[in-house]
Image (cartoon, coloured by chain):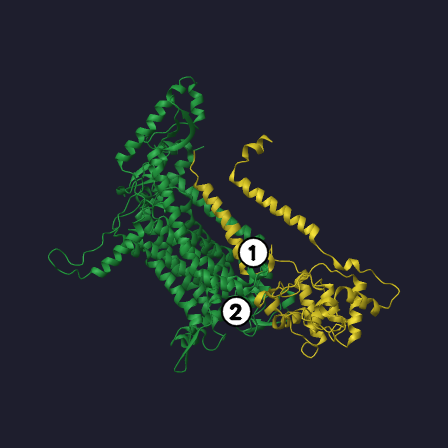
Amino acid sequence: MKFLAARRRQPVVALAMLLFALVAVGGVYAAVGTVRPAEAAGAASSETQVEMGKQLYLQGCSSCHSLQAQGSTNGPTLIGVGAAAVDFQVSTGRMPLAAPGVQAVPGPRQYNEEQTAALAAYIASLAPGPAIPSAEQVDFASADVAEGGVLFRVNCQQCHQAAGQGGALTQGKYAPSLMNATPTQMYEAMVTGPESMPVFSDATLPEEDKKAIMAYVDNLQNAADPGGLSLGRLGPVTEGLFLWIAVFGALIAVAVWIGIKAR
Amino acid sequence: MSTTNSTSASPVASSPIEAAGGAVATYVDERVGSNKFLGRNLGKVFPDHWSFMLGEIALYSFLVVLISGVYLTLFYKPSMVEVIYDGSFVPLKGIEMSEAYASTLDISFDVRGGLLIRQMHHWAALIFVAAIAVHMFRVFFTGAFRKPREFNWILGVGLATLALAAGFSGYSLPDDLLSGTGLQIARGIIQSIPIVGTWGAFLLFGGEFPGTDFISRLYGIHILLVPGLILALVTVHLMLVWTQKHTQFPGPGRTNSNVVGYPLMPVYMAKAGGFFFIVFGICTLIAGLVTLNPIWIFGPYTPDQVSAGSQPDWYIGWLDGALRIMPNLESYFFGYTISWNILIPAVIMPGLVFTALAFYPFLEAWVTGDKREHHLLDRPRNNPTRTGIGVMAITFYGLLWIGGGNDIIATSFNLTINSITWFLRLTIFILPPIAFLVTKRICLALQRRDRDKLLHGYETGRVLRLPHGEFIEVHETINYKELAVITSKTDIAPLPAPVKVDADGVANRRYRIQALRAKLSNFFYADNIAKPTAAEIEAAQHHVNHAAALEAPLHAYEDADEIRNAHGGVLHHPGMANSNTEQLTGRSEQ
């Protein structure tokens, strides 16, 4: 205690206290503040899938998308969006919307697989739309990675960035990182065009091309960095930051060390 | 052993190594006459300070760039001929690309040690430009560019410009999508120059973009023209440092006509040699551990593609930022378009910045009327206006730099790109002047503290209560080192306002220019806190002595050693001579 007591009036202590307080407040908020609305909705085993989906819909979605899914000023209509759109939005945690903003933010998913399938079945029952892809449709094992790279660079990287790290769009909107996207989610995003994304129907991108793109993104997700630490694969900005802080910091430290007068 | 013979032959040598060294030196001297030259120059004294080594970082990283670059030329093919890639990097196998890109992929994946050397080359190049920038800060803020070193400053600005050219031309050589995007922007900038722009772009690229000539042209520029010029300028730069002697910071025994420091041999040979290997080592370490410019992710260049988050290397970032925050502005004259939105941020602004940078020494000399030689550096606080201008420039640069990374900043910190852009459009005019004022005020405050220290010494924290009840705090004189540093300040009086018509009624024809000069001189020096006069110090010293005398009886009761400990070591006196470790040589000696 003597060690601390002797140093309690140092200027750095104020900073340390501030930092501690911020971390404490932030930590408590993160631990207590998270709302999980879906947990209230239990599984209804006796009803059909569509009926269960409807119940879940009325509880968790209808306040914005309206009771008949026709949409309101708070949310778009879901008639005709198809099961693929529901599966994409719900499985990535974008829906139910955690907070209104320029676009839905992915997060921890609020509905489990069964509930998600029920919601998708209910929305699909309202009007035809893109379906959730079958296992065969997202099996990219035989796809050409290099061809996928070409397609990715032509169609995807102008928003999602060359390494799939995501990029900024206008007015705070953004193309998300693809590093955690599953093949099913990629397929669904391509056919439904969530948020600012255009729809890549089979007329624009045939199934084979979609598989090739999945294969390339999978390669981006799993490939090692042959050059060493990747610095987030964000390009020259992080490289420059690393240069000025770490590399130049080290060089200056050495210069100071050499420049110290021998005593 | 045959040592006896050689030791008896040469009376100076006392060991076999020295004897052998002497023999070699004599052998060489008899043939090229080197002893006289070496004898005169090996003992040359350089002052010691860590900030004097920033230029060395630039020099050493440049050597690393040269050495690693030679290795890369063995494998790189500067050709835009389309080939089908058949190397070992699977995600690009079978893709059509230029030979330049394919050979860079080969360097990265199929040449032994290729990726390490490529990353070393690139990291060292980034360090090179950064070291030049920081070296320039040091020279600027300490006024090392003043007479007689103005030409060397201009050489330095030339080197900085060449470093940017070297970096950008090298960044473009791999012909990957990122560098091609940069080239397309560069071409757009050339095209924005009125009248000659379009023709200039056609000339450089040999036709439409991207054409088939540019990579091979750039290659010649990158490996021959620019490095050749850099080497030539570096040589002259260092020769001038050698003949003009290095500047030094103020300190005990340091004057405008001497150099206090250590001799080249052996001290700086060891320090500089060691530092070279440390810089080399850091370049190698970083190159081995951290990815730089992963061209295999970007893919081959085709003009119809562009990636989100495309950025130039850090040293071009400020220009990219200027382009990004510039509002869209175009004029049309007789069917011709003037693209102010590109011309202003990418041509006019950097042109002004580099011109101002190059001519600053002459501008300051003209404003201040200072024609003296300066070998003793200014402390940044002692020229608040210059320091303020420097910080203002850094702030301006920093804001443009932020603009260059606006998309990465937007996604990383959940901001909108539009508000970042508007923030920068406003602050680029607001923040630099504020930075100037704040810096200037801080400098003046530091000057006041210096003056205070000279007059009243430093506060010891020992409070005395006098017999009649008065409390005083004991002040002690600052030590001789600090005294020498603080008293190095020279006060320059602002120029007086010129007379319009002299006593004989003759009109002053140069009145307007003189009035401007006097105004600027006032801007520089009117707020200066004058150094105390000798009489003022004398009077103040009296005060300090008085307090010490009052305190003296207390000390009589204590052990002498205890007093010394309590006061934090030995008490220094202003008159104390230079310490033994410092050597003096006359500036006129050589």
Farthest residue to the right: give it: A46
Chain A colour is yellow
Q: Could you tell whether A121 is left or right of B209 in the image?
A: right
Most distant residue in the bottom direction: B335
Chain that appears green: B
Toward the viewer: A35 or A132? A35
Amino acid at dot 2: Thr
Between B74 and B485, which is closer to the camera in this rendering? B485
What is the x, y in percent for residue B499?
Answer: 18, 56
Query: How many residues crowd around disc 1 within 10 Å: few (fewer than 14), some, or many (20 or more)?
Result: many
Q: Residue B490 in the image: state x and y as whole percent.
A: 29, 43
Q: Disc 2 sits on a residue from what chain?
A: B
Q: Position of residue B278 (x, y in %)?
A: 49, 46
Residue A97 visible in the shown view:
yes
- Chain label for disc 1: B
State which tag comes first along the sequence, 2 or 1. 1
Q: Which residue is mark 1?
A: B116
Please name the residue that numbered disc 2 is placed on: B181
Q: Are marks 2 and 1 on the same chain?
A: yes
Q: Nearer the viewer, mark 2 or mark 1?
A: 2
Q: What residue is at 60 percent from the left and 31 percent from the top?
A: A1
**Number of residues whose C-alpha sits closer than 10 Å to that of mark 2, classed few (under 14), some (14–19) or many (20 or more):** many
